[in-house]
Image (spheres, helix red, strand yellow):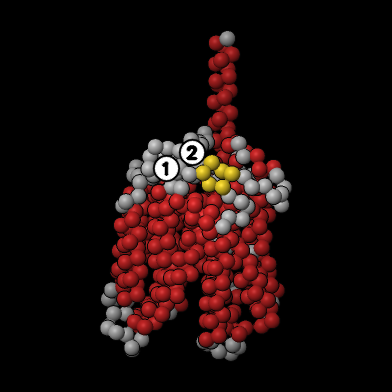
Amino acid sequence: MEADSLCRSSCGGEEMKAAGTMEKRELVHLFVTVFLSSFSIFLVFPAITDVTIAAVCPGRESCSLAIYLTGFQQAMIGMGTVVMNPVIGNLSDLYGRKALLTFPLTLSIIPLAILAYSRETNFFYAFYLLRTLTAMTCEGSVNCLALAYLADNIPEKERVSTFGILAGFTSASFVCGTLVARFLPTSLTFQVATLGSMMAAIYMRFFLKESRLSDHGDSSLSQPILKGSEPVLERITDDDDYAPKTKVAFKKMPSAADLFGLLRSSKTLSQAGIITFFQSLAEGGMQATVLYFLKARFQFDKNQFADILLLVGISGAISQMIFMPLLAPRIREERMLSFGLLLSCISMFLNSVAWAPWVPYAATVFSSFGLLAQPTIRSIASKQVGPTEQGKAQGCMAGISSFANIVSPLVFSPLTALFLSEDAPFNFPGFSIMCLGLATVIALILSTMIRASPPISSHSVA
């Protein structure tokens, strides 16, 4: 009997070790998928402005119509993703992460293939229309689903460092895409991007295994995707005021009331949502305004812009893939969040009062560590819901971030234009960037009040 017991224990330990190895191998497949998908997106960024102007206003160096078209597209994409990210996250809880990942990865191929074939005006407008429609549906959903997949397969104590590694792969894809774009002619850029996007979809379908939601008693993954079930998900009650206490029912297509109900079900989740809004508001504002500020303040050109972006990408990848896994076991997530937001504040305030061209380069050191904030917020949010609600939680956070990215350019772009003009109320060209820093200060103050509740589940993976 003792021999049988020892055998079962030994065999069980070996099986658990093998399962852990299998899970880590699956995560590598996920990271490769995210890298290829993001690489295809970032590869076309440097070229799309010139392609747009050449198609809309041939023979001209600047074109107001191109600016308006780009702004309209960004606004439409933002409004679409506010709605669609929570919906896709919710559907992934029902039918699996892999099934829903197929949707954005496949749709993203179509617009790129059009410009890979031809960049003439008619083809450009076809690309513009399809890019707007597909991005309204899919923008940000690959990252949302990837985070949910990690939450399914990673123990809670290792989640924040793994989320950071995923963000690091995204930063690395940005660096690689930007570097390759500088050496590729425009005629080949969209062809390579199309190939990369196709490889991401094919690689994911062949190598990535479905998430292990069925291990937690979720039988809905075996249902057809069009079957009209409406599962009720019951949240575990805890004596801690920060723990979820309500029972939240979701349909396949969650309404705004459903999402607010999810946020209200946990004080920590509500705080994470508010912090996400202010952090994304500041981040979106920086993306929309800082390059215009640097051009007006120091006459930076595209090469200097590229240098700064590459510095941010390289240092961000290092901080997320190396420093974050080292820091995660030693400090609490709430402190890491506050640390990242503090360094983001310092970076924005330095840029706002930049007195010499080298200051923006120095500020990238702080902004790169500021990139630790977003994966930490997502990790905190993931621990406030059960294993069958990870898609909803990540989709909700992505929706809040998308809404902030709509509001931010509408507020801070006119403010930047005003203080860079001769009609500025007072002489402070970086005033709008300082306001962005103040938005990050609000997020920082809120982060000092957050207290991660005991995890909603005991889900762990050997």
- Number of marks in picture: 2
* Residue at x 57% of width, y 66% of height: 80
Q: Is residue 35 above or below residue 12?
A: below
1 or 2: tag closer to the N-terminus: 2
Q: Is residue 222 above or below residue 193?
A: above
From the top left corner, tell me how far across and down residue 230 is, in percent.
Answer: 64, 47
Tell me the residue at 39%/44% (across/down). 242
- Residue type for callout 2: Ile
**Residue 411 percent across, percent down from the top left:** 41, 74
Q: Is mark 1 on a helix, strand or loop?
A: loop
Residue occupied by mark 1: 243
Describe the element under mark 2 as helix, strand or loop. loop
Q: Position of residue 218 (x, y in %)?
A: 62, 39
Mark carried by residue 215: none
Can residue 364 be seen at all in this image of the molecule? yes
Is 351 left, or right, of 23 in this rendering? left
Q: Looking at the rendered structure, which numbered label has been put on residue 236?
A: 2
**Occupied quadrant, residue 370:** bottom left
Q: Do the residues labelled 1 and 2 touch (CB within 8 Å)?
A: yes
Position of residue 92 measured from the top left corner of the image (x, y, whole percent)? 61, 50
Asked if 294 appears above or below 264 in the picture, the reply is below
Left or right: residue 64 versus residue 134 is left
Depth check: 7 or 279 in front?
Answer: 279
Separation of marks 1 and 2 at Cα, in angstroms: 8 Å
Quadrant of the drawing holding the N terminus: top right
Residue 372 visible in image: no
